Every structure is written in structure tokens, then in C-alpha cells.
Image (cartoon, rainbow, N blue to C red):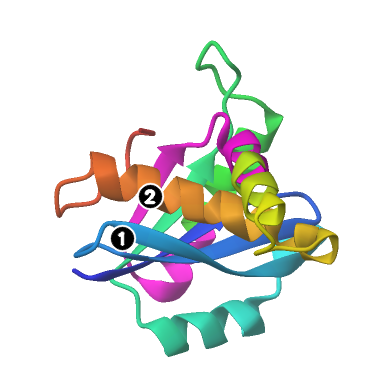
Amino acid sequence: MSCVLGFDVGSRLTGVAVGNAITTSARALTTIIMRDGEPDWLRLDALRQEWQPDTLIVGLPLHLDGTEQAASRAARRFCAQLQARYGLPVALVDERHSSREAAERFAAARAVGLKRRRDAAAIDALAAAVIVERWLHASPLMPDDTAAR
């Protein structure tokens, strides 16, 4: 296993990132528009074809106390759709504070001139990269599709 795709599922946009299990690193790729709870499947098909991932990683939104919330159901539904469509292992990862970490990374990159204000739309993809990195650092080589990390 070397390549994984990760997702930060939102109601309007879903961030997408690619990760490398060998280097345990990830980078933001793009955002996918969500319409009526459905992603742009043609765009996702193209990303899957381009990157040929071994595993798919989805952030699981949780309350601070670790309990699930309404958005958790949407993430779990997205997981089931990914698994049915692509037949790949899908792992859930606790995404608490991933958006905050992504915003902090964006602000730091902006402070040194690497990002501009107009790049802020990519924060969802950066949050997906944070989620992928968490999974890569917590995971042995086998995904765990039954529990959030």
C-alpha cells in the first residue's frame, strides 16, 4: 500500500487529499462540490483513476466528547458509497479539530507568502490532508474500517 485518498466531507464541499504511506505525508488536492448530499461522482472517478489509491480515508465528525453528530451520518453514508462504488477499503478517522489545524496551517503559509487570501477555498482540501496524515501516523499498513481513530 502506498497511495491513499482522503476526504473531509461537508454539506457544500468535500475536500480531497492524497497521501503516501511510505513517506507518511499528505497534500491537499482539490474540493468536490456536493449537491443534495451527493458528490460529483465523475470528478471522484477521475481522481481515483489518476491516483489509483489502495485505501480511502474519510473524516468522521464527532462532538468534543467523542459522540457522533448529524454530520457523522453523512460521513458514514459517504463511506458506504465509496466502498460500494470502488470496492476499496475505507477507513474512518476522527476529524475533531482538523479544520482548525488546516486553518492554522493556511495562516502560517500565508504569513510567509506561500498562500494568498484567494486560496482560502482550498482549506477543505487542507483539512482532508490533516485527516490523511492522522491516519498515516496512527495506522499500521492495514486500514480499520470499523472504528474512528
Q: Which residues are magenta?
A: 81-103
At 57% from the left and 64% from the top, the residue drawn is: 16
Foreground: disc 1 or disc 2: 2
Distance between the alpha carbons at the discs numbered 1 and 2? 17 Å
Image-based side of 24 in relation to 110, left or right: left
Q: Percent position (x, y) of residue 40?
A: 70, 75
Looking at this view, name the residue that lies furthest to the left: 141
**How many numbered tags mark residues here?**
2
- Residue on which the image places disc 1: 89
- Label 2 amino acid? Glu
Label 2: how many residues lie within 10 Å, few (<14), some (14-19) or many (20+)?
Answer: many
Q: Nearer the viewer, residue 104 or 82?
A: 104
- Residue on which the image places disc 2: 133
Q: Is residue 83 magenta?
A: yes
- Label 1 amino acid? Pro
Establish if 92 lies above or below 82. above
Establish if 24 lies above or below 18. above
Q: Percent position (x, y) of residue 12?
A: 81, 56
Q: Percent position (x, y) of residue 143?
A: 24, 51
Q: Nearer the viewer, residue 84 or 109?
A: 109
Residue at disc 1, secondary structure: loop
